[in-house]
Amino acid sequence: MAKKIFSVDGMKCVHCKANVENAIKSINGVNEAVADIEAKNVTVDFDDALVCDNDIKSAVENSGRYELKV
């Protein structure tokens, strides 16, 4: 299991926050995702045997106009 904080550009409102969280939570192996609009980041708790950083990056960037920094 791993817990990481990723920087996310493009989150401006609660709708953006929900999009980012839901995109990450939809990945098999992710237990929790909590985005913080003001800090411009997302904390992700995931099984690192099933999920890699690039999986999370792809999910976020495909959910809207967001850029996740790995």
Image (cartoon, grey):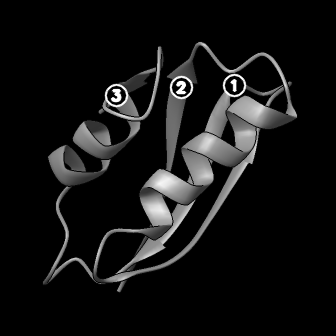
Relative placement, left or right, of 56 versus 14 is left
Looking at the rendered structure, the secondary structure element under dot 1 is loop
Relative placement, left or right, of 11 versus 36 is left
Q: Amino acid at mark 3?
A: Glu
Check the picture and name the quadrant holding the N terminus: bottom left
- Disc with the residue nearer the chain's start (1 vs 2): 2
Foreground mark, 2 or 3, reads 3
- Disc with the residue nearer the chain's start (3 vs 1): 1
Looking at the rendered structure, the secondary structure element under dot 3 is helix
**Disc marking residue 32:** none
**Disc marking residue 61:** 3
Crowding at dot 1, Cα within 10 Å, few <14 / some 14-19 / many 20+, comes out as some
Cα distance between the residues tagged 2 and 3 = 9 Å
Identify the residue shown where x is 80% and y is 29%.
Answer: 37
Identify the residue shown where x is 17% and y is 60%.
Answer: 52
Label 1 belongs to which residue? Answer: 40
Identify the residue shown where x is 29% and y is 33%.
Answer: 70
Q: Amino acid at mark 1?
A: Lys
Label 2 belongs to which residue? Answer: 8
- CB atoms of marks 1 and 2 within 8 Å: yes
Residue 47, percent across and down?
A: 30, 84
